[in-house]
Amino acid sequence: MNIFDNFGTFTALILTVAVFSGFFRQNPLYRFAESLFIGVSAGYFAVIWYFSIIKPTFQAALRGDLLILIPLIAGLLLFIPSNKAAVYSKFRFLPAAFIVIVTLAVNIPVYFNAFLKEMIRTSIIPLISFDSDGNFQLDVTINSLLSIMAVTSTMIFLVARHRNSNVLIHRTGEIGRFYVLVAIGAAFAYTLLSRLVLFMGKIEFIINAAKVRF
């Protein structure tokens, strides 16, 4: 198999090596790949948005549906240049404020049900757990105790630790601080691991592409 018979594979190989060259230092090859990625992405989404949003909106407005022009005008307000002396510049923040308010109103109940409600439910489970036959379940009991300790100490750390000089509250807040650091570390490790998997996949692609005979 000749690598030039597959132009897509050859192009992907060159661009992958060009991007990885940025690990060493900034160079023209890396800047070209970066600019190409940004330009192609911007051009692609501009065409998609034109044919899926802008063009259908104008066609609907020409058919008499003028109500659809409201979100279009609101979107265009975001592109008004900032000028404190101009009266119209005060309206440029209205669409962004509307988007933020609606997003918060929609997402707060979702996050409450997905996270806060679940944490409350987990925190009120029985501390001492038994199975249906009356046998003591050590693993479930330990998990319940750790869950109660984690939720309580983290709340104390975030709310009351810096507002009270009580030794017990301070020590409990330090335990909550440990749980917060564990959560942040686990999230960072998960993100790093996922990036390493992608990196290893690209390295494997380069090796397999390099094995192809020219």
Image: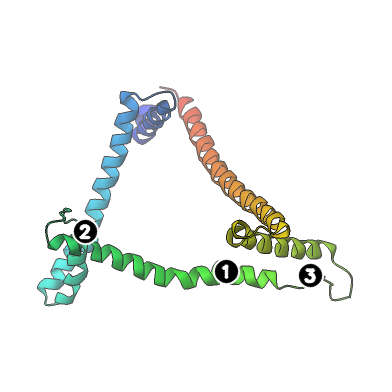
User: Which residue matches tag 3?
Assistant: 127
Residue sitting at x 88%, y 75%: 133
**What amino acid type is highlighted by mark number 2?**
Leu
**What amino acid type is highlighted by mark number 3?**
Leu
User: Which residue matches tag 2?
Assistant: 78
Mark 2 vs mark 1, CA separation in Å? 34 Å
Between discs 1 and 3, the one toward the N terminus: 1
User: Which residue matches tag 1?
Assistant: 116
Give me the disc on residue 185: none
Q: What is the number of callouts on the image?
A: 3
Between discs 2 and 1, the one toward the N terminus: 2
Residue sitting at x 41%, y 71%: 106
In the figure, 45 relative to 213: above or below?
A: below
Left-right relation of 39 to 121: left
- Dividing the picture into quadrants, the one containing residue 40 is top left
Left-right relation of 135 to 164: right
Q: Position of residue 114 (x, y in %)?
A: 55, 68
